Amino acid sequence: MASAAEADDPSLVATLEKFCLYETRARFYVIGSSREKRWFRVLKIDRSEPSELNVSEDPVWYSLQEVKSLLQRIDEGNRSTGGLTFVTKAYGIAGCIKFLESYYLILVTKRHQIGCICGHAIYCIDESQMITIPHSSMQTDVATSKNELRYKKLLASVDLTKDFFYSYTYPIMQSLQQNDTYAGIKEMPYENLFVWNTFLAEPIRSRCRNTLWTVALVHGHFKQVRLSIFGREVNVVLISRRSRHFAGTRYLKRGVNDHGKVANDVETEQIVFEEEAGSLKGRMSAVVQMRGSIPLFWSQEASRLSPKPDIFVQRYDPTYEATKLHFDDLAQRYGHPIIILNLIKTVEKRPREMMLRREYFNAVGYLNQNVPEEKKLRFIHWDFHKFAKSKSANVLGVLGKVAGEALDLTGFYYSGKPKVQKKRSTQLSRTSTARDGSLDIRVGSGDLSRLSSNADALSSTGFQDMRKEANKQEPLGDAPCYQTGVLRTNCIDCLDRTNVAQYAYGLAALGRQLHAMGLSHVPKIHPDSSIASALMEMYQSMGDALAHQYGGSAAHNMVFTERQGKWKATTQSREFLKSIKRYYSNAYTDGEKQDAINLFLGYFQPQEGKPALWELDTDYYLHVTTAGDDLMSNSYPSRQVLNVLWFSHGRQQGYAPVCLGIPMI
């Protein structure tokens, strides 16, 4: 709801959320309004230039009656050329783009709410529309040429109705910790690596010098559920944000580029908050982890003959400069320590992953030379496949121990005890995206994880007795705490094995989050509890979405399906079909998908007389030598981190990476 001040003073209106597009022969008029349609702004787009974009914003805020009068005058003034015509309703502008001649306006024409974070609505797109800006009488033959139409079709293949989401009032491209620490942001920070339409929105934002008209689209996954714990309702949100840098499909984007950007770079945030959070009445907590391709120069050619093509180290970087750039970027984004969980194989009949494991280990060791202890990279290597082959293996138990120690090092964000306490209401809001019927979760002292003896395969160095620690710990109380540092997980594709590890981390973190918020007596959740099951479904959904985007099929979830007790024969047949689908996508359709991503993100900008996008032998230079990665500089505010505990884990010798209790195999 708008504040009373906004009702009296339109300059205090922070967002425009509803739009109407009108046209005359000479101009488009976009009428934007606040949510309650009390105040209105006007954006004018010239239609007389076939290849230029002329946009101007009327600085005046209009009332409803005033904007109706304005539209009437525009209609009367253009009667000789057809008057003013209504075109469509919209809920935001995704951006503008030009191929060979005309500019196109991309509108969000239908939406629905998928969540609500601390009172801020989160939306996804149901329908979008691309409208040619120049009037047809102004266009040349280029506007209807085969190449122009092919570019339009290619851009349309980036489906905005799948896995894109946005908010008018909450900077969802940033973590809750960032948004809470740096409150008072007046405009959406588009200069962010997770805003996928940065390139598309720039023409309008630069001309209007504001972000009122465009929506900042994040690509990845969003899921929100509501849980009931001892009668107290909490929201659990899982957000995955894909980086727009070095973005693409599985075999076409591997490793790192010269700027230190890695393929399949995804930040995952797990948020827990009470319904009244954000109004100084409820508590909230968040933890961030990330996944990304192994930051070396390597590739793997998609093959129609082999579902598992060879892995090639493209070139050796003796000083690991690109790898260093990547970890420097992570340090700027998250702080220290950076904990690397590497899940690739150590033993293979035909060496593939082994080569990368060895080179990755050498790279981290090299970068740890002459670096202060607190800035050394912490390296964990654990052969997921080798361990999982054992019938008695407790994969989630082992990964849970790793997660626990990582959380000891990085901490997590907790807002602290609210200043004002108020009796809570348990009524579900109409905008809730929770499942039918809230889950009744019983978290108590009996919910401590029971790790199997297989976890003893790990060295006990650096690990604490989790059960004893759980019994000792008390809720964090009044003081807020902050996450500094991050756990970075990878396998080869950063999909299947990585997703299991990220769930284990999320489960360990959720126990601590609920404990900090005073919702449970101990900072652990039993892996067979209903809350663990609910969280597993969320991570399963996230894994499937990211796997479709990067790999072309749903994720392989053998560990999850076994935990859920599903019939093994059925599970195996489903996993086989996923493999077939992924193989087909990688071999036959990923090339066009990559072209569409390069066009959408602005890595390739068509020019008349130059080779077309589909005529290029490779897109490598687009992601290395052009302005694509530097299209908008990433802005990371310096972190004001409080109450951080640093732990050291023994001395390192020579080039050896810092290890967290796990022996190098």
Image (cartoon, rainbow, N blue to C red):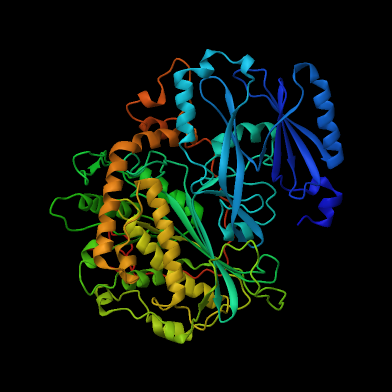
Residue at the image position 54 percent from the left and 68 percent from the top? 436
Using the image, determine if residue 252 lies above or below residue 339: above
Using the image, determine if residue 81 lies above or below residue 377: above
Instruction: Residue 178: give x, y in percent of width and height.
Output: 59, 57
Residue at the image position 45 percent from the left and 82 percent from the top? 470
324 vs 300, left or right, is: right
Instruction: Residue 584: give x, y in percent of width and height.
Output: 28, 42
Task: Say which of 544 and 446 sits in front.
Answer: 544
All told, the count of numbered labels is 0
Task: Say which of 646 and 128 sits in front.
Answer: 128
231 vs 63, left or right, is: left
Task: Say which of 41 and 260 sits in front.
Answer: 41
Using the image, determine if residue 645 lies above or below residue 298: below
Instruction: Residue 253: give x, y in percent of width and height.
Output: 35, 41
Q: Quadrant of the C terminus?
A: bottom left
**Hey, which quadrant is residue 372 in on the image?**
bottom left
Task: Say which of 550 and 326 sits in front.
Answer: 550
**Hey, which quadrant is residue 403 in on the image?**
bottom left
Q: Is residue 655 visible?
A: no
Instruction: Residue 504: give x, y in percent of width and height.
Output: 39, 68
Q: Quadrant of the N terminus?
A: bottom right
Residue at the image position 42 percent from the left and 52 percent from the top? 545
Q: Is residue 397 visible?
A: yes
34 vs 382, left or right, is: right
Residue at the image position 48 percent from the left and 24 percent from the top? 149
**Hey, which quadrant is residue 567 in on the image?**
bottom left
